[in-house]
Image (spheres, rainbow, N blue to C red):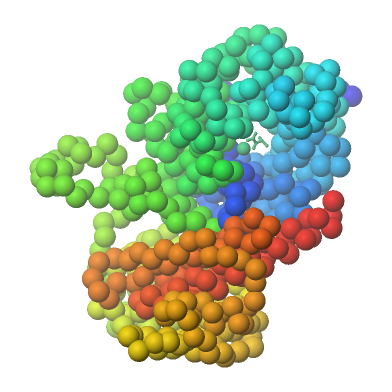
């Protein structure tokens, strides 16, 4: 076959290409399953934010994944859309089919290269893997012009063999070469040295863009990604909030802000609109039901909060005393008292726009109804209240089962009793249940209507704002007997209602996840 030459290497040598894999590596992490609609929402936002490449999924994994990648390929306006494929012909063909309608489509194919993987997982020799690389990259290049090849477990692969693999991939037509730290094992010095050594030893290394892909098992994913760039990589693969396998992937927001804030030391740039980072974080947190830790760099709730007297004093005198970047630069506005029960639709719509939301008509009406109900119960409605409410609305919109009503008898004279009505695809069911405390009674009532085999792995409550009338945001994590983990989140001024919503959301996710796995098993 003839390999058409495309201009894979960007003209601007300091431009770092951002490859977001929230919808693939991120979605792979336990508990982060997204529905089809949620994936569309995330993809649209990543595209608007200036992400260069969106890895939309793993098309062969299930029909649902294939449909999501195809739909994203068809709707994304600027970004390249990538589909992942193992080094297997049917995977590559399916990925090619899924990205066919994209303005710019990419097949991302990978194979393990480390001795540990070759011996224990693949049972293949080095020569056999080299032949696989040539064959599969060739096949992918016959389907699309833009082919990324990844050396899985590159950081535990001897450099001499890695060089032969990269050489084979480039000869077969790969336009991007990804050298992942799959197991999160490398140190920054080692990771940089690997890129330097491979790029120096491969004859045609300048025909491809080199890419860093780091996992955070030792908390080094961002540092390693930046070290990869120092070693010559010009693409970084990362996820919003750093979600991903095990300890996660490198966090997109941290990479982008490190490059922007330390332009003096790093001298690179990306095409990301950083003012959208906070919104992206909230959106991904809402649809995956994965809370963002309070002290998370860039997007954590405390990332710009100054608590100690000395810091507050300094900040009042000059912002630069304790702030290396402004909250506005990542899209955090000043906390403001927003609206009350007299605010109308127009004001609410404007507020949502300011906060970065773009809701469809039905979603807007539901959010407005909930906002009015909240404003009736809560004296001051803050931006954070609206964000919690709308994020939950977005996450809940496609749930089959929703909480309609809950009454709980609690107090010292047990047993506590919950009366609960759920809406299951339009039909209302009401049950009563007792329990060891009001939360237990509420969860027992849900289990009566939605029987499942999940065990409660986490129940967490925190207040969205201050004050005794603050909304409670509740996270519930369930694990089923197959080890699948899902998280649900709910917000309300009533902690028990928030708990019920979070529990129902988690059970909804458990069911979607189970169906997805059953479909995937049937497809293989
Ligand atoms: O971590 C990894 O090696 C991956 C590959 C599929 C690129 O996610
Ligand atoms: Zn990975």
Q: Nearer the viewer, residue 164 or 341?
A: 164
Q: Position of residue 519 (x, y in %)?
A: 79, 60
Q: Residue at x 23, y 71 (%)?
A: 467
Q: How many numbered marks are there?
A: 0
Counting from the top left corner in percent of width and height, residue 472 is at 36, 70
- Residue 368 seen from this side: no
Is 295 situated left or right of 167 in this image?
Answer: left
Work out whether 330 lies above or below 353.
above
Q: Nearer the viewer, residue 1 or 132?
A: 132
Q: Image point 84% across, 58% down: which residue?
A: 522
x%, y% of residue 318?
Answer: 14, 40
Q: Is residue 319 above or below residue 134?
A: below
Which quarter of the figure is the N terminus placed in? top right
Tell me which image quadrant ligand 2 sits in. Answer: top right
Could one spot residue 86 in this view of the protein?
A: yes
* Corner quadrant of residue 407: bottom left
The residue drawn where x is 29% and y is 39% is 325
Q: Which residue is nearer to you in this view: 109 or 452?
A: 452
Q: Which quadrant holds residue 491?
A: bottom left
Residue 193, horizontal then vertical, whole percent? 54, 14
Identify the residue shown where x is 53% and y is 42%: 248
Q: Nearer the viewer, residue 59 or 47?
A: 59
């Amino acid at each position: 076959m003839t390999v058409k030459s495309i201009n894979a290497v960007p003209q601007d040598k300091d431009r770092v290409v951002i490859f977001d894999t929230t919808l693939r590596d991120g979605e792979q992490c336990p508990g982060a399953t997204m529905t089809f609609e949620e994936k569309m929402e995330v993809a649209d936002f990543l595209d608007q934010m200036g992400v260069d490449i969106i890895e939309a999924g793993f098309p062969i994994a299930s029909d649902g994944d294939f449909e999501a990648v195809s739909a994203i390929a068809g709707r994304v306006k600027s970004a390249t859309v990538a589909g992942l494929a193992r080094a297997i012909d049917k995977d590559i063909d399916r990925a090619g089919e899924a990205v066919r309608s994209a303005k710019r489509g990419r097949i991302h194919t990978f194979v393990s290269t480390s001795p540990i993987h070759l011996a224990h997982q693949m049972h293949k020799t080095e020569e056999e893997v080299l032949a696989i690389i040539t064959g599969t990259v060739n096949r992918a290049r016959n389907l699309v012009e833009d082919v990324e090849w990844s050396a899985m477990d590159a950081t535990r692969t001897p450099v001499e063999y890695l060089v032969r693999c990269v050489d084979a991939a480039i000869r077969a037509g790969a336009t991007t070469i990804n050298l992942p730290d799959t197991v999160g094992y490398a140190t920054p010095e080692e990771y940089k040295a690997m890129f330097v050594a491979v790029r120096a030893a491969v004859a045609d290394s300048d025909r491809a863009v080199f890419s860093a892909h780091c996992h955070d098992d030792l908390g080094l994913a961002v540092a390693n990604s930046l070290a990869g760039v120092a070693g010559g990589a010009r693409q970084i693969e990362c996820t919003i909030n750093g979600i991903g396998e095990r300890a996660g992937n490198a966090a997109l927001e941290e990479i982008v802000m490190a490059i922007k804030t330390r332009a003096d030391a790093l001298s690179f740039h990306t095409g990301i609109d950083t003012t959208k980072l906070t919104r992206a974080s909230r959106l991904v947190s809402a649809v995956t039901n994965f809370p963002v830790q309070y002290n998370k760099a860039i997007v954590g709730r405390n990332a710009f909060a100054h608590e100690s007297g000395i810091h507050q004093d300094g900040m009042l005198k000059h912002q630069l005393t304790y702030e290396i970047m402004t909250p506005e630069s990542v899209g955090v506005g000043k906390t403001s008292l927003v609206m009350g029960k007299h605010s109308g639709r127009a004001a609410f719509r404007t507020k949502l726009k300011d906060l970065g939301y773009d809701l469809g008509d039905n979603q807007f009406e539901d959010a407005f109804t909930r906002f009015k109900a909240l404003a009736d119960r809560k004296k001051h409605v803050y931006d954070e209240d609206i964000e919690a409410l709308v994020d939950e609305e977005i996450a809940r919109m496609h749930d089959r089962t929703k909480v309609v009503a809950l009454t709980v008898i609690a107090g010292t004279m047990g047993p506590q009793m919950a009366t609960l009505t759920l809406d299951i695809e339009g039909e209302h069911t009401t049950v009563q249940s007792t329990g060891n405390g009001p939360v237990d009674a509420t969860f027992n009532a849900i289990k009566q209507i939605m029987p499942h085999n999940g065990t409660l792995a986490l129940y967490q409550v925190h207040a969205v704002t201050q004050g005794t009338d603050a909304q409670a945001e509740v996270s519930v994590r369930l694990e089923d007997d197959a080890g699948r983990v899902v998280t649900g989140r709910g917000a309300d001024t009533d902690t028990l209602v928030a708990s019920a919503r979070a529990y129902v959301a988690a059970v909804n996710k458990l069911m979607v996840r189970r169906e997805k796995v059953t479909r995937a098993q049937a497809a293989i």
